[in-house]
Image (tube, grey):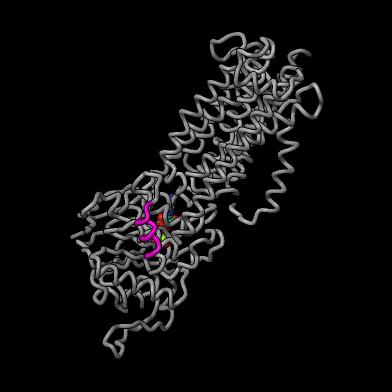
């Protein structure tokens, strides 16, 4: 089974260190792990460090069936939509990066279509990328990630531009994929109720360092929210015995300000 | 969806096929036309059965017209492909051998040979001008490339650097022209207008060889190059080594741009517009975009070559003038009528 552990992982852009001391794991296939923290905390940087796109100290240990280049799939926060490509072509493009032949097999096209259907974006197939809304582009980006058949999936704020029902749909879908295909999913998220509802583990980053990590119900506490976000909030238990968050206001000046 | 996609692919192949047919027609017309008035039939028979026609006709067709017509095709193709890949790796619709200063640098190199008689490479005679032009063009391309790898230089800045190069080399050229003899001045002016008339089989052969060597490199990376158009982050997320791909492509493109410019002079329009027409016709999947850009560039320059012989009967106008005067209105009409917007 696929597993990922981080040991004192840090990252730097050139000489500028922006991340240090991230240790978790091992995270295992079938688990959804949220990466949370204020803006510019270093969430995207952590993903890039795991991928090796950014250099840094510490160790990233991955056990997967395929080599890391194929096993880890990353969905960046946004992408450029200037290319003269249709949605369908752009997803085929993602699927074809691993093999260099020019022919696109029927099986590949089938796969692209199934994934588009599962994300309910089939009707966008032959629209140009430039004609999409931010939310539609995000769904295309998710499709591009899924079509590469990941073992480990790193998603950087995949729901930031989606409406409420799409957010729920995507997160539920990812949760389901993780459980049914033993996928290891890391998601950078801002909505903590989504974290409570759909994630098993959480990594909290603030100001370039890891503040806490572990099972969601242990880590996400009123004290943590006040410390990391400067937000007064209450954790309640809903009628289905699940925790949820009620926000009362700021507890003081925001620490990131 | 699958069916729609396959149909799309088939349509693009048809467009490529159609462009090839148009190119072939242009090529034959280009050879048939010229100051010496032979009939179309005579020229064609000289092409198919060179030994069955008069020696004079054979020389005119095989040693004068064919190299010029072929040069229009290969130089147009090379410049257009160079422009296409510059636009791809720099993510900028204005990128082309002309706007990045490569043509201007070549012009300066050529002027050095024509005015001062300085050879930058140890070649003499007919090869001095293209030799100089080539060296300067490559230097300019390498400068742009290494500037682009410096920290803090974004792809947006690169066009500005290119424009700066254009002004620098134009100023240097003006300086040379100011000091030049009347005869040298005329030669420089003629060179900067761009002309195919000096083409020989060797210059055609060299340009074609560069094209043949570089195309497979691009074709091998066609998926990765297409991915680059979704932005560096996205391409990297697909497992593309963005830095290396950009480096390799820029070096290859330098060669592809420098060689034709060295032989035919400043022909600004093809490298910019060929790729745009190809993009409008078939999108940016490099499997189709690359051959499309190549064919569009070849057709444009071949057409320009034909028109340059028709405007003033008995004379051949410099082709650089024609490409701009005829190409720009055509390009405008394409921009205003095309529905797909890609930049
Ligand atoms: N390419 C880069 N070069 C230099 N600094 C960067 C770069 N990308 C991000 N940073 C810096 O690293 C820090 C963390 O950024 P990021 O990981 O994007 O935060 P977020 O948690 O919002 O995803 C920020 O201070 C940001 O300014
Ligand atoms: Mg981020």
Where A255 falls versus A62 (above or below)?
A: below
Q: Which residues are magenta?
A: A105-115
| Quadrant where ligand 2 appears | bottom left
Tell me the quarter of the picture where residue B341 sits: bottom right
Identity of the residue furthest to the right in this view: B312
In this view, the residue in front, B118 or A163, is: A163
Identity of the residue furthest to the front in this view: B52
Residue A38 in picture, x, y percent from top left: 40, 67
| Residue B162 visible in image | no
Residue A82 in picture, x, y percent from top left: 54, 54
Judged by its main secondary structure, the magenta piece is: helix
Question: Which residue: 31% across, 58% down?
Answer: A149
Where B324 falls versus B105 (above or below)?
A: below
Tell me the quarter of the picture where residue B16 sits: top right
Question: Which residue: 25% across, 49% down?
Answer: A67
| Residue B68 visible in image | yes
Is residue A112 a member of the stretch shown in magenta? yes
Residue A84 in picture, x, y percent from top left: 54, 52
* Horizontal side of residue A1 vs A73, given as left or right: left
Q: How many marks?
A: 0
Question: Which residue: 49% across, 66% down?
Answer: A136
Where B38 falls versus A256 (above or below)?
A: above
Is residue B13 a member of the stretch shown in magenta? no
Residue A8 in picture, x, y percent from top left: 24, 55
Identity of the residue furthest to the bottom in this view: A239
* Horizontal side of residue A89 vs A154, given as left or right: right
In this view, the residue in front, A189 or A100, is: A100
Question: Which residue: 64% across, 18% down?
Answer: B46
């Amino acid at each position: 089974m696929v597993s990922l552990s981080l040991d004192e992982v840090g990252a730097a852009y050139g000489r500028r260190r922006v991340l240090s001391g991230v240790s978790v794991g091992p995270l295992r296939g079938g688990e959804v792990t949220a990466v949370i923290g204020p803006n510019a905390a270093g969430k995207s940087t952590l993903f890039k460090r795991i991928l090796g796109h950014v250099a840094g100290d510490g160790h990233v240990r991955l056990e997967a069936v395929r080599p890391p280049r194929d096993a880890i799939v990353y969905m960046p926060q946004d992408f450029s939509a200037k290319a003269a490509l249709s949605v369908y072509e752009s997803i085929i493009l993602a699927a074809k990066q691993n093999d260099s032949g020019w022919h696109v097999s029927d099986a590949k096209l089938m796969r692209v279509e199934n994934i588009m259907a599962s994300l309910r974006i089939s009707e966008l197939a032959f629209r140009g990328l430039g004609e999409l809304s931010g939310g539609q582009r995000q769904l295309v980006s998710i499709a591009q990630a899924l079509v590469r058949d990941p073992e480990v999936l790193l998603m950087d704020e995949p729901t930031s531009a989606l409406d409420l029902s799409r957010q729920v749909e995507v997160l539920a879908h990812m949760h389901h994929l993780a459980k049914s295909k033993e996928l290891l999913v890391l998601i950078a998220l801002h909505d903590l109720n989504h974290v409570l509802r759909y994630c098993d583990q959480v990594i909290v980053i603030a100001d370039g360092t890891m503040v806490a990590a572990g099972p969601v119900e242990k880590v996400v506490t009123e004290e943590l929210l006040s410390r990391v976000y400067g937000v007064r909030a209450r954790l309640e238990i809903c009628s289905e015995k699940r925790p949820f968050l009620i926000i009362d206001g700021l507890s003081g000046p925001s620490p990131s300000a | 969806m699958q069916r729609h996609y396959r149909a799309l692919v088939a349509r693009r192949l048809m467009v490529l096929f159609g462009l090839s047919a148009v190119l072939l027609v242009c090529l034959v017309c280009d050879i048939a036309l010229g100051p010496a008035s032979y009939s179309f039939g005579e020229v064609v028979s000289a092409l198919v059965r060179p030994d069955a026609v008069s020696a004079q006709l054979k020389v005119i067709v095989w040693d004068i017209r064919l190299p010029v017509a072929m040069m229009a095709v290969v130089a147009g193709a090379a410049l257009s492909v160079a422009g296409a890949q510059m636009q791809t790796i720099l993510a900028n619709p204005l990128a082309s051998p002309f706007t990045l200063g490569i043509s201007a640098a070549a012009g300066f190199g050529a002027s050095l040979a024509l005015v001062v008689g300085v050879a930058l490479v140890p070649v003499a005679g007919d090869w001095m001008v293209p030799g100089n032009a080539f060296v300067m063009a490559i230097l300019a391309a390498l400068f742009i490339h290494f500037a682009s790898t410096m920290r803090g230089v974004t792809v947006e800045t690169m066009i500005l650097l290119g424009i700066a190069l254009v002004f620098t080399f134009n100023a240097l050229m003006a300086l040379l022209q100011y000091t030049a003899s009347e005869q040298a001045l005329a030669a420089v002016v003629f060179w900067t207008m761009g002309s195919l008339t000096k083409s020989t089989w060797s210059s055609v052969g060299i340009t074609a060889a560069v094209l043949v060597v570089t195309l497979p490199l691009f074709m091998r990376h066609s998926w990765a190059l297409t991915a680059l158009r979704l932005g560096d982050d996205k391409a990297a997320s697909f497992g593309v080594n963005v830095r290396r791909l950009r480096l390799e492509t820029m070096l290859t493109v330098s060669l592809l741009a420098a060689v034709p410019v060295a032989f035919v002079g400043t022909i600004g329009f093809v490298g910019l517009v060929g790729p745009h027409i190809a993009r409008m016709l078939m999108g940016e999947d490099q499997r189709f975009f690359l051959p499309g850009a190549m064919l569009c560039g070849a057709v444009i320059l071949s057409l320009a070559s034909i028109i340059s012989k028709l405007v003033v009967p008995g004379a051949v106008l410099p082709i650089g003038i024609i490409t701009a005067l005829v190409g720009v209105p055509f390009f405008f009409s394409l921009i205003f009528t095309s529905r797909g917007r890609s930049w």
